[in-house]
Each structure stands twice: as C-alpha cells, then as structure tokens.
Image (spheres, helix red, strand yellow):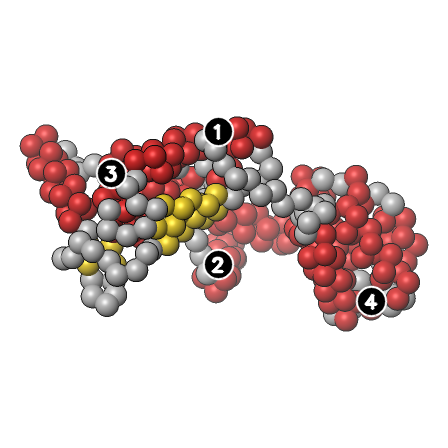
C-alpha cells in the first residue's frame, strides 16, 4: 500500500449509451472508473490509495451491520476519493462523448465540485457532439467547436480513400469509373457529409449497389438531403429485400449486438452467429 504516486496521472473515460455496458452511460460509472485510474496503480508495484481502503472498510462494515451486500461507491464518494488523490499529484481528467450519458448534469456537477475544491491543479477535458444543452450546463468552459469547415480536409481525404478503394476492389461499377466521375463523386460526398465520416461510408455502400453509371449520376443529386437515419433505414430495407437466409443472419447479428452482456471480439461474434445457424439447422433436421 502506498499513498503517493510519482507522476501526474491522466484518467480517461469513453462514454457509450450501450445496453451491453450500462456503466458507460451513467455518471456513477464514469466517476468510478476515473477514481480507479487515479487511486490504483499496478506499476512499478500494486498500490492502492489509503482513502480507497478507508472507504472500503466503511462500506464493508455498514454491509455487515445491515446484513446486505456491500454497496458501490456513490458519486459523493468518488468525488472525495478523487480529491484525496489530487492532494498527492495534479491530474488530468478526460471524458469523451459526454452527450452519451443519461444524466450529464450530475456528472458535470461532480466535476465542477472537484475543480472548485481541489487544492492541486486538475484539468478537465470534455468532448461532446454539438449540443446546446450540454454547453449550457458547463460552468465556465473554454469551448473549442470542431465544425464541418474545420475538418473538411479530413473528410475529403477519407472520401478519396474510400472511393478509390471501392473502385480498386471492383465494388463500384465493377471498377469502371472515369477520373471525372470519381472526382464528381468525391465532391458530392464531401459536400453532403458535413463533419460525419460515417455518412460518407454509408452513402458509398448504397452507391456501390447501383449497377449503371447513369443511376449513379442520378443518385448524386440527392445525396445531400439524406440523413443518417434515412441511410440506416435504406440499409435495413435492403436486408429485408434479400433472401430468407440473409434476413435470418442479419436478425441474429442484430440480436447479439443488442443483447450481448459484454463486447464481443470479431472472432467471438462470428462464432456465435455460426453456432446459432448450425443449431437451427440441426433442429430442423
């Protein structure tokens, strides 16, 4: 056990509104992870901050006295533990995708309390989608907005790479795409994408399903009006129009993605789909 750490730590958390990882969408889950990163170290030797041991002892005693399971650290507990860690070293806290949190105000209030009460330097970096409600609840932030104008060069590079790959892999018009059409396609994708790389990817998948150049050119005129929701809906409709086996595999895939208790690796995900298919075939036979 040791109290002090030799370096100013950085604690990072990526928020995610996922049913398979509910702790990633709650203020409590975020703060518990940040607390763990700041108070527990595995190198050069395992160390736990004394404040954590004291809290564990108190919660354990309370649970034994009440006859219930030991409760997890509350938001107020995490704030106190982080403040205790900050007495030893300055720290940096990074929270990515705050807009994915169910109740972001509770997390922002906790972070504000840490900033105001800390006797040491603590820097807090928060990222979020463009969300006026999020910006309004931040106490006195220095907001850096990344707009589509600022990352348009990156979107263009991504679009060029994606279109070039689709052509070289014979996915777009069997590879028969003139330079002029390629440039026109890239311009249309960049113009409609805004700051969304995913929009480019989904639009290109849809365009690759077209078999004639005239159909592709006609589709370019309506790219800018398509939203992400519409692209998802179009992809789902293509699945519905596919064969029965394709529909069943897609449904099974969605089920695993929605209800898996933990994130699956690609190999584990494929194994689960194959196993379910084989089980269904064996049942039919």
Name, please, the residue furthest toward the left: 65
Picture quadrant of residue 73 = top left
Residue that badge 3 annotates: 80
Labels 1 and 4: the sequence-earlier one? 1
What residue lies at 27% left-to-right and 33% top-to-bottom?
76
Discs 1/2, front: 1
Numbered label attached to residue 137: 1
Q: Quadrant of the N terminus?
A: bottom left
Give left or right: position of 267 versus 32: right
Q: Dot 4: few (<14), some (14–19), or many (≥20) neighbours within 10 Å? A: some
Query: Are the residues flagged by discs 1 and 2 in contact, CB closer than 8 Å?
Result: no
Q: Report helix, strand or loop for mark 4.
A: helix
- Numbered disc in front, either 2 or 3: 3
Q: Residue 177 lies in what quarter of the image?
A: bottom right
Q: Residues within 10 Å of mark 1 (few under 14, many from 20)?
A: some
Q: Is residue 233 left or right of residue 115?
A: right
- Precedes in sequence: disc 3 or disc 1: 3
Query: Is any atom of residue 33 visible in this view?
Result: no
Viewer-proximal residue, 174 or 226? Answer: 226
**In 3D space, how far apart are the residues under numbered discs 2 and 3 (Cα atoms)?**
40 Å
Which of marks 2 and 4 precedes in the sequence?
A: 4
**Residue highlighted by disc 2:** 269
Q: CA distance from mark 4 to mark 3?
A: 61 Å
> Label 2's element?
helix
Question: How many other residues sit within 10 Å of disc 2, few (<14), some (14-19) or many (≥20)?
Answer: some
Task: Indicate the secondary structure of the residue bearing disc 3.
Answer: helix
Q: Say left or right for 241 vs 53.
A: right
Q: Which residue is disc 4 drawn over?
A: 174
Alpha carbon of mark 3 to alpha carbon of mark 1: how far? 22 Å
**Picture residue at 23% right of the left edge, 68% below the top:** 44
């Amino acid at each position: 056990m040791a109290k002090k750490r030799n370096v100013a730590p950085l604690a990072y958390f990526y928020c995610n509104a996922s049913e398979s990882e509910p702790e990633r969408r709650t203020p409590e889950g975020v703060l518990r992870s940040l607390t763990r990163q700041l108070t527990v170290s595995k190198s050069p030797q395992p160390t736990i901050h004394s404040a954590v041991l004291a809290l564990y002892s108190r919660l354990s005693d309370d649970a034994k006295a009440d006859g219930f399971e030991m409760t997890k650290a509350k938001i107020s507990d995490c704030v106190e533990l982080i403040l205790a860690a900050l007495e030893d070293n300055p720290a940096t806290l990074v929270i990515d995708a705050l807009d994915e949190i169910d109740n972001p105000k509770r997390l922002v209030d906790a972070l504000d309390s840490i900033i105001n009460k800390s006797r040491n330097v603590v820097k807090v970096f928060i990222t979020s989608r463009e969300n006026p409600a999020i910006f309004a609840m931040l106490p006195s932030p220095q907001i850096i907005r990344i707009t589509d104008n600022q990352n348009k060069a990156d979107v263009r590079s991504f679009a060029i790479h994606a279109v070039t790959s689709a052509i070289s892999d014979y996915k777009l018009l069997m590879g028969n795409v003139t330079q002029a059409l390629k440039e026109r396609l890239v311009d249309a994708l960049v113009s409609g994408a805004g700051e969304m790389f995913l929009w480019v990817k989904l639009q290109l998948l849809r365009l690759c399903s077209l078999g004639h150049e005239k159909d592709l050119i006609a589709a370019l005129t309506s790219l800018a009006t398509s939203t992400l929701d519409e692209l998802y809906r179009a992809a789902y409709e293509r699945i519905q129009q596919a064969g029965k086996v394709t529909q069943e595999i897609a449904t099974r895939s969605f089920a695993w993605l929605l209800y898996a208790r933990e994130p699956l690796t690609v190999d584990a995900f494929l194994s689960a789909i194959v196993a379910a298919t084989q089980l269904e075939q064996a049942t039919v036979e």
